[in-house]
Image: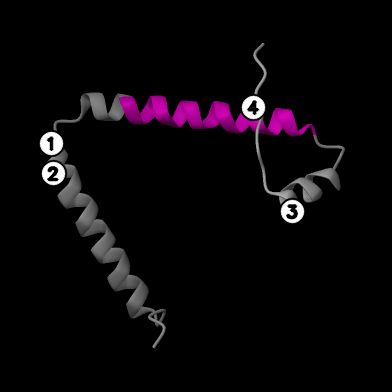
Amino acid sequence: MANMTLSIPEELYREMQSHSEIKWSEVARQAFELKIRELHWMDEVLRRSELSEGDAERIGHKVKHEIAKRFLKKGHGGT
């Protein structure tokens, strides 16, 4: 098995030390495996997609616009 070295913020490290019963390397390994599975799934979806890059960009902008409208409607506009 390969080894990896990570850099994490000092505060996070202190929090992790306070829970020494946790195998943090296992937590990290599981997170890496989950992310890889997600990436494989996304690659497969993209491989089968008939949308162009422009189509995907337009849909993304529309989704962001609708989310912003909903957010502002609920009074989170900061005004």
Would you name the residue on which mark 4 appears? 29
Would you name the residue on which mark 3 appears? 11
The amino acid type found where label 3 is placed reads Glu
Mark carried by residue 67: none
Q: Can you give x and y, in whole percent of width and height, for residue 10 in the image?
A: 73, 49
Kindly check if marks 2 and 1 are in contact, taking CB atoms under 8 A apart as contact.
yes
Quote the CA–CA distance across marks 1 and 3: 43 Å
Front of the two marks 2 and 3: 3
Q: Quadrant of residue 77?
A: bottom left
The amino acid type found where label 4 is placed reads Arg
Q: Can you give x and y, in whole percent of width and height, for residue 56 in the image?
A: 19, 43
The amino acid type found where label 2 is placed reads Asp
The amino acid type found where label 1 is placed reads Ser
Kindly check if marks 3 and 4 are in contact, taking CB atoms under 8 A apart as contact.
no
Provide the secondary structure element on which disc 1 rests. loop
Horizontal side, residue 69 vs residue 3: left or right: left
Work out whether mark 4 precedes mark 2 in sequence or the reverse, and give the earlier one: 4
Q: Quadrant of residue 17?
A: top right
Work out whether residue 5 or residue 1 is closer to the camera in this orientation and state it. 5
- The relative height of residue 63 versus residue 30 in the rendered view (above or below) is below
- The relative height of residue 70 versus residue 40 in the rendered view (above or below) is below
Provide the secondary structure element on which disc 4 rests. helix
Dominant secondary structure of the residues highlighted in magenta in the image:
helix
Would you name the residue on which mark 2 appears? 55
- The relative height of residue 74 versus residue 38 in the rendered view (above or below) is below
Quote the CA–CA distance across marks 2 and 3: 42 Å
